[in-house]
Image (cartoon, coloured by chain):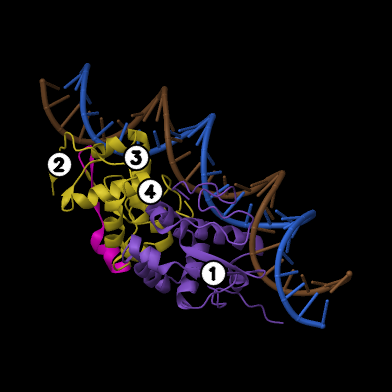
Chain colours: A yellow, B purple, C blue, D brown
Amino acid sequence: MGAEGGDTLKSPPFAPNSRAMTLPHPNADQISLPIVLAVLGDPTRLAIVRYLASKEGVALNCSQFLDLGSKTNLSYHLAKLREAGVTRAEVVGTNRMITLRRADLDARFPGLLDSVIAAAGEDKALPAVGGADEIEIQA
Amino acid sequence: MGAEGGDTLKSPPFAPNSRAMTLPHPNADQISLPIVLAVLGDPTRLAIVRYLASKEGVALNCSQFLDLGSKTNLSYHLAKLREAGVTRAEVVGTNRMITLRRADLDARFPGLLDSVIAAAGEDKALPAVGGADEIEIQA
DNA sequence: TCCTTAGTTCAAAAGTTATTGAACAATTGG
DNA sequence: CCAATTGTTCAATAACTTTTGAACTAAGGA
């Protein structure tokens, strides 16, 4: 991945967050540029971000991305995105409702997310989330 | 690095370019977003790009970056940047004159380079060329 | 309660990337 | 020509990252 991304799936260096119910996220000022770039530099994760951007305002659960990989593999990639500060995951029952951290990213790295999303939209080589059965749950 | 970057230091999938005198570069339409992001997601390479941006218009040779790593290591990172299409390296004598491929990057990914450079400029954790990162030991 | 759905964790295997030093090649200045 | 300068290549190794399946937890519905 390049930039050292911390522990991934180990004891969080982030918020207090004990006794599970929320997942660890960096706060805005802890978001690192090289880590964000490295995390976005993976086609699966870039495809996740592109899809999230295309549904902005809607919180999606992990199963929405099953076209992009196995359940286990998505769990891994979604954790990377969350730990890098690119996405936020809110626990709702057995679901993780996932959103882009647009405001935080725009504040830290103005223009970056927009240019990445626009360019990703043009990228024919990226894997895509197929337009089949979509169960969107409103925020 | 994430995105599959091709062979690196092997037979070029790019231009004809036989019998060394020019180095292999992708042309603009071959530049891939995930590969560029993955390549920029390394602190050393991001520092190289930041420094190139700070000297835009000037072609720098590899030795300029020696603060960021060993000669061999820089050769490796500069090859990655070149192969991803982020930089151009022109052979001039024993030197490789290195420039940012700003026009090509702006054409392919509008706004991306500017936002990365601006954000990298704010990043206190990145290694620096001008000695800002150096620990000076007194005699 | 039992079953299903949603997602995580673990450990192993595979694959990639980064770093190193020694050896090399090409150019240029003395 | 010789030596210095510039940078590449090679092979080894270290250090990650990604992918996988099996086992697991937690919540919610029948």
Q: Are marks 1 and 3 in contact (CB under 8 Å)?
A: no
Residues indicated by labels 2 and 1 sit on the same polypeptide chain: no
Disc 4 residue crowd, few under 14, some 14–19, many 20+, Cα 10 Å: many
Q: Is residue B136 left or right of residue A99?
A: right
Chain of the residue where label 2 is placed in the rendered structure: A
Identify which amino acid the numbered label 2 is placed on.
Answer: Glu
Residues indicated by labels 1 and 3 sit on the same polypeptide chain: no
Q: Residue at x 34, y 33 (%)?
A: A70
Identify which amino acid the numbered label 1 is placed on.
Answer: Ile
Q: Name the residue nearer the viewer: A51 or A3.
A: A51
Residues indicated by labels 1 and 4 sit on the same polypeptide chain: no
Residue indicated by mark 3: A75
The image position of residue D22, as x and y in percent, is 41, 22
The image position of residue A129, as x and y in percent, is 25, 40
Q: At numbered mark 3, what does the secondary structure look like: helix, strand or loop?
A: helix
Give the CA distance from mark 1 to mark 4.
33 Å
The image's mark for residue B98 is 1
Q: Name the residue nearer the viewer: C3 or B58.
A: B58
The correct choice, above or below, for B2 with respect to B48 in the image is: above
Query: Which marked residue is nearer to the observer: mark 1 or mark 3?
Result: 1
Q: Residue at x 51, y 63 (%)?
A: B45
The correct choice, above or below, for B139 with respect to A21 in the image is: below
Give the CA distance from mark 2 to mark 1.
48 Å
Residue indicated by mark 2: A136
Residue indicated by mark 4: A80
Q: Which residues are magenta?
A: A92-108
Magenta stretch contains residue A36: no
Disc 3 residue crowd, few under 14, some 14–19, many 20+, Cα 10 Å: few
Residues indicated by labels 3 and 2 sit on the same polypeptide chain: yes
Query: Which marked residue is nearer to the observer: mark 3 or mark 2?
Result: 2
Chain of the residue where label 3 is placed in the rendered structure: A
